[in-house]
């Protein structure tokens, strides 16, 4: 019996975010497509070499992407929405990036309204949403009645041959056909109805890979850890009855949870191997062993592919030792290492005590190699690695950095009054209208303004000590003052200070809270060239001192209009951090909530009439199984209410959410009791508002009318059309006007015309409303 090591996917971005810079240089027209492709090939080659040198026996290919692996799958099978006017045989890079980022048409075309109807020269990007319960975004496939498929990209074949030329016979990674269809949106068609035609294309792909020399293919079906309908179960049976009977051997890969009641289904599929996530669902191993046929090769996800804590290798060894003596095994991360930073060795600034508790992608492969060596040769073969692992585990358990008795005491004394506003929304709304005196369709933005190269350069110079605190502070004041003045000039009703002093909406707060540590190179891909550095939440959380009050006060002093206080909510801070695994997540979230509550009350005391507490990630933290939803929603909503419940009736609380399918959780959204909620709706053409309309959402809502995740600039008519559509879902007197999200990733030459058009659209809606009132009064 032998134990080998596999990786299911390696970080794509490069050790120092080389992919980000190569993409952005190409998009800016500074480099050629050939130069981008050369940079990408170099990253792939380095990735394969690195994984092999670390001890991986089975290397993936096609895990690399220039934007997103689901978009790559759409390109592979030729699933191109009609608005892109594609009629070719293959999908070229221009079309690929158009599907990801949209296409900007000329002003004449936009004024004619072509943008709203999807004109080929001014085309919206595909919708984007979160990949299961991670902070990675994927491009949602769009399928239509009569959809046909064909092999339209050679990427998966090219990268297999590319690796082979370098001496690596890889295991190509392919998103499974049923999960692909379950993640897709259909127009006048149920996506699963398209399975027969899609299977023909998948069979051709697998045959071509076999002909190229691929012995195994990793076929990812993460939807197998979800609640499945009878139709979806049948789809899996039909798919693998067709695909697993010839061609390469299939390693059916599941992750992000346990198979649960889908185990019998999976055990009967005629696949050659099965990967189980034993980090999220450690108890599924024994039932799987009892159900699976002996010939099925087991891949065990024993190292956490989504978090950065070091594994306890001795514990894993004794858990697997008996099984390793009975059958061949593959050891792997629980999922792709896409979700972890690349290499801990770059983090020379971390406290050594904390660093010894961590493992990034490189270290995780080393852990797997050490564990496999011990299982193959005996525990002493990995003596040094096991000793270091044991010492780190004990040190973490006993460290005084972890626990703060004052935090535990405050949490224990929390009572019901801390989770409710003093008055219902109807009373608060009257008090807020009197205080704020805002017009119909009030306009605002979500918070941040462009983080220009100059802003980033000034921040970097300050970090390096090249400019002192006073000079940096003065620079930020100039930027803030200019942003406030510009907002006044274009007629926004509720202003923001722009957040030029903030590096990231979670990191900025984490840096000022006790219990967090930060990396310098711990980047993780969010989508495309967008990367984030999640904070490391290692201990009890508290707020030593106010975090945002001084900058809010400075910005408010520049204007007579309301200036929003801008905060990140506890659930989002939790979900966008690497969270400690030694206590329940809800306990950590309540600790953060109390810290943010203190900040809210300090902002109100300073005079803030509007305070926004962003919960962009509330939906993405929802468990994958519906039976677990209610418990999560109960504590997540409670945590938000802890932050917001201590203010007066006339203080208006806003929140913001990204990419949220609200239908299943709309009552929980209502239970948050925010005075105003802003959501992403531009890419989905207000589709998300169906949930708010059917529920009769009682508070106010800002449906985003400007898709900020695309460089495309929407026209006034397009945004007016979206607002008119919104008014069909939600009463007009509840509607705010705002972009989908913050504007930090956009350029000023994109933001300025878009916001001017947005204000004009709001004024147009006000004029319509007045005209309607006048007509009804006659």
Image (cartoon, helix red, strand yellow):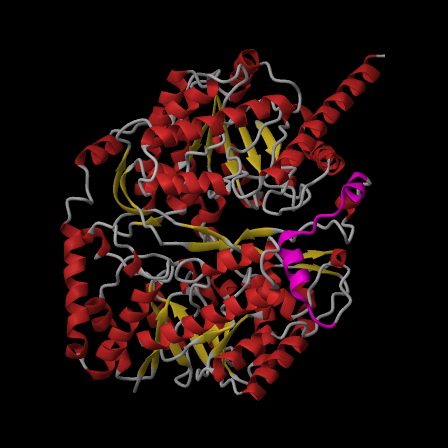
Q: Which x, y percent locates residue 8? A: 43, 70
Asked if residue 159 shows in the view, the reply is yes
Q: Which x, y percent locates residue 362? A: 33, 66
In the foreground, 28 or 635: 28
* Quadrant of residue 140 within the rendered picture: bottom right
Could you tell me which residue is drawn at 14 percent across and 67 percent down?
A: 387
Asked if residue 571 shows in the view, the reply is no
Task: Judge whether 479 appears above or below 244 on screen.
Answer: above
Could you tell me which residue is drawn at 67 percent across and 35 percent down?
A: 753
In-image side of 481 versus 573 (left or right):
right
Q: Quadrant of the C terminus?
A: top right
In-image side of 774 versus 72 (left or right):
right
In the foreground, 616 or 739: 739
Task: Judge whether 261 appears above or below 662 on screen.
Answer: below
- Please identify the dominant SS of the magenta region: helix
Q: Which x, y percent locates residue 259? A: 44, 65
Residue 109 among those drawn in magenta: yes
Q: Which x, y percent locates residue 685? A: 69, 43
Q: Quadrant of the N terminus?
A: bottom left
In-image side of 52 versus 384 (left or right):
right
Residue furthest to the right:
778
Could you tell me which residue is drawn at 59 percent across and 73 percent down?
A: 155
Magenta range is: 89-111
Residue 684 among those drawn in magenta: no
In-image side of 664 versus 334 (left or right):
right
Task: Judge whether 769 appears above or below 408 on screen.
Answer: above
Could you tell me which residue is drawn at 56 percent across and 70 percent down?
A: 176
In the foreground, 7 or 667: 7
């Amino acid at each position: 019996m032998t134990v080998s090591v596999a990786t299911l996917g390696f970080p794509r971005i490069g050790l120092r975010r080389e992919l980000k810079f190569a993409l952005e240089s190409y998009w800016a027209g500074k480099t050629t497509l050939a130069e981008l492709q050369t940079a990408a090939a170099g990253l792939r080659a380095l990735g394969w070499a690195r994984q092999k040198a670390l001890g991986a026996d089975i290397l993936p290919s096609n895990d690399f992407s220039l934007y997103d692996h689901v978009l790559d799958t759409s390109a592979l099978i030729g699933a191109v929405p009609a608005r892109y006017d594609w009629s070719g045989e293959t999908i070229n890079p221009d079309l690929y990036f158009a599907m990801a980022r949209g296409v900007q048409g000329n002003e004449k075309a936009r004024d004619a309204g072509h943008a709203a109807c999807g004109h080929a020269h001014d085309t919206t990007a595909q919708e984007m949403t979160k990949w299961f319960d991670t902070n990675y975004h994927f491009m949602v496939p769009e399928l239509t009645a009569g959809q046909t498929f064909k092999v339209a990209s050679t990427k998966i074949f090219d990268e297999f041959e590319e690796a082979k030329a370098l001496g690596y016979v890889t295991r190509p990674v392919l998103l499974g056909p049923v999960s692909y269809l379950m993640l897709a949106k259909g127009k006048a068609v149920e996506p699963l109805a398209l399975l027969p035609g899609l299977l023909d294309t998948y069979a051709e792909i697998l045959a071509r890979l076999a002909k190229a020399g691929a012995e195994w293919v990793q076929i990812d079906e993460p939807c197998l850890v979800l609640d499945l309908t009878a139709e979806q179960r049948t789809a899996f049976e039909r798919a693998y009855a067709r695909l697993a009977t010839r061609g390469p051997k299939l390693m059916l890969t599941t992750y992000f949870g346990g198979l649960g009641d889908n185990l019998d289904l999976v055990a009967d599929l005629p696949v050659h191997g099965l990967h189980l996530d034993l980090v999220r669902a450690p108890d599924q191993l024994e039932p799987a062993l009892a159900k699976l046929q002996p010939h099925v090769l087991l891949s065990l996800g024993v190292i956490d592919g989504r978090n950065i804590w070091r594994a306890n290798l001795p514990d894993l060894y004794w858990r697997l030792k008996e099984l390793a003596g009975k059958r061949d095994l593959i050891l792997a991360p629980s999922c792709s290492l896409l979700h972890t930073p690349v290499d801990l060795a770059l983090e020379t600034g971390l406290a050594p005590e904390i660093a010894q508790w961590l493992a990034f992608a490189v270290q995780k492969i080393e852990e797997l190699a050490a564990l496999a060596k011990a299982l193959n040769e005996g525990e002493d073969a990995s003596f040094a690695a096991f000793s270091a692992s044991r010492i780190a585990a004990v040190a973490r358990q006993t460290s005084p950095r972890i626990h703060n008795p004052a935090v535990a005491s405050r949490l224990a004394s929390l009572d019901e009054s801390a989770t409710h506003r003093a008055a219902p929304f109807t009373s608060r709304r009257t008090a807020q209208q009197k205080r704020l005196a805002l017009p119909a369709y009030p306009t605002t933005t979500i918070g941040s303004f462009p983080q220009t190269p100059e802003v980033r350069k000034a921040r970097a110079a300050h970090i390096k000590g090249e400019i002192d605190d006073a000079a940096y502070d003065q620079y930020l004041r100039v930027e803030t003052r200019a942003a406030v003045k510009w907002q006044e000039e274009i007629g926004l009703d509720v202003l923001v200070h722009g957040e030029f002093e903030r590096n990231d909406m979670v990191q900025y707060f984490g840096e000022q809270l006790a219990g967090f540590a930060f990396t310098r190179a711990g980047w993780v891909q969010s989508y495309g060239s967008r990367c984030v550095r999640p904070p490391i939440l290692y201990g009890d959380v508290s707020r030593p001192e106010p975090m945002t009050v001084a900058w809010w006060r400075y910005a408010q002093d520049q204007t007579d209009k309301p200036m929003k206080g801008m905060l990140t909510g506890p659930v989002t801070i939790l979900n966008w951090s690497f969270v400690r695994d030694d206590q329940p997540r809800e306990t950590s979230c309540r600790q953060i909530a109390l810290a943010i509550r203190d900040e809210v009350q300090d902002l109100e005391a300073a005079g803030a009439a509007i305070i926004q507490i962003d919960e962009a990630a509330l939906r993405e933290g929802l468990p994958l199984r519906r039976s677990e939803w209610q418990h999560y929603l109960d504590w997540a909503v409670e945590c938000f209410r802890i932050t917001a419940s201590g203010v007066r009736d006339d203080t208006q609380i806003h929140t913001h959410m990204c990419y949220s399918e609200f239908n299943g959780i709309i009552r929980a959204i209502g239970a948050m009791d925010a005075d105003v909620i802003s959501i992403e709706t531009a890419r989905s053409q207000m589709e998300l508002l169906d949930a708010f309309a059917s529920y009769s959402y009682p508070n106010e809502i800002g449906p985003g009318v400007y898709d900020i995740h695309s460089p495309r600039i929407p026209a006034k008519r397009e945004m007016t059309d979206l607002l008119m559509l919104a008014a069909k879902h939600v009463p007009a007197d509840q509607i705010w006007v705002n972009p989908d999200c913050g504007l930090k990733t956009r350029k000023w030459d994109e933001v300025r015309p878009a916001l001017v058009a947005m204000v004009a659209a709001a004024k147009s809606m006000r004029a319509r409303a007045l005209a309607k009132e006048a007509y009804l009064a006659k």
